[in-house]
Image (cartoon, helix red, strand yellow):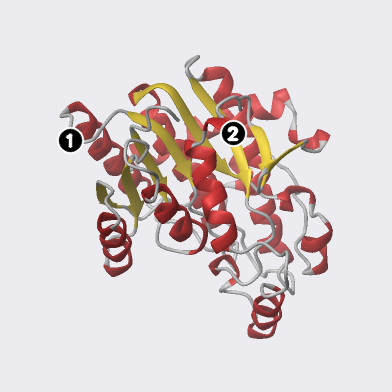
Amino acid sequence: MSEPGTVLITGPTRNLGRHAVPAMADRPHGQRPDLLLVGRAGRDLTAVAGEVRARGARVREIGCDLSRLADVRAAAATVRELLATGTVRPLRALVANAGAMSADTRRASPDGYEMTFAVNHLAHAQLIGDLLDSFTAPARIVLLGSNTYHANFWRKLLGVAGARWADPVELARPATGELPPGRTASAVAYSNAKLAILYYAHELQRRAGAGISVSVFEPGWMPGTALGREAPEALQAVACALGRVPGVSTPRRSGPLLAAMALDDQWAHLRDGAFVVRSQPAEVRPVAHDRDREQRLWEATAELLNRACASQ
């Protein structure tokens, strides 16, 4: 990106984000962006910010619990103020990196929504919607996708179920009663959220300005990351062991690839929710393109976000 401006990234303190942020900060002088790190306030966020400052980058910490939509709205307001006052350079990229996989789909966010759907989709839809008029073209929005939406070979091996789509208002509703045995319910919720991200990316591109490009990055299968921290200990141990197999993706390998999606001229042409697996463009399955579902998701997302705002 010839004029890097400012890059906002969510989830900068762990795993993929933790390795993408230094890769952005290590750009040569003149190509190094200002960084807005949006994540839970505390020691981890302060440590990442301190590290990238030491590398010569200009960075701002913005404390935000993405499970709380009021926090997300406040974070967006802070970003708009920083831009309006010229405290940071123009906003050129937003990387919606943060994610969650709740082990219990009955667990609700503070706004009353199923936690996996709330963090992976609703929080970023709120943030992007609040900042859509704040970008300076050419600009990029990079969303974090996953092949779990169709449960590819490796995910099936670990019992990660594919998506089972329903109306988004239903997907946002926490489960009730007894959960089925195993991790099927949480895996389906995660896969549904990742399919929602693909649908959202396609519809967002239709509604974003001509100078904003929307793409989706799949970091590759990364066993042993914090997404599985609520899994049974035995499964976590297997995943960690698999993470040491040569060729398997890791945050250290994929983090710089995510940074490249936000900054490199190599990816400047990507639009329309283009799907990139690590460093290779890839075709998504037919189920990931559905104009009716995409429009309904957009409408339902606005309904859910407005409902949360009205209740506060």
Nearer-the-camera pick, 24 or 191: 24
Drawn side of residue 269 relative to residue 10, left or right: right
Q: Position of residue 5 (x, y in %)?
A: 33, 32
Q: Position of residue 103 (x, y in %)?
A: 60, 68
Q: Residues within 10 Å of mark 2 (few under 14, many from 20)?
A: many
Identify the element where label 1 is drawn: loop
Drawn side of residue 239 relative to residue 2, left or right: right
Position of residue 144 relative to residue 101, above or below, is above
Identify the element where label 2 is drawn: strand
Residue lying at 37% horizontally and 27% vertically, measured from the top left: 3
Q: Return the mark for residue 87.
A: 1
Residue type, mark 1 in image: Thr
Nearer-the-camera pick, 252 or 225: 252
The answer to whether residue 75 is seen in the rendering is yes
Residue lying at 65% horizontally and 28% vertically, measured from the top left: 294
Residue lying at 52% horizontally and 58% vertically, measured from the top left: 16
The answer to whether residue 312 is seen in the rendering is no
| Residue annotated with mark 2 | 215
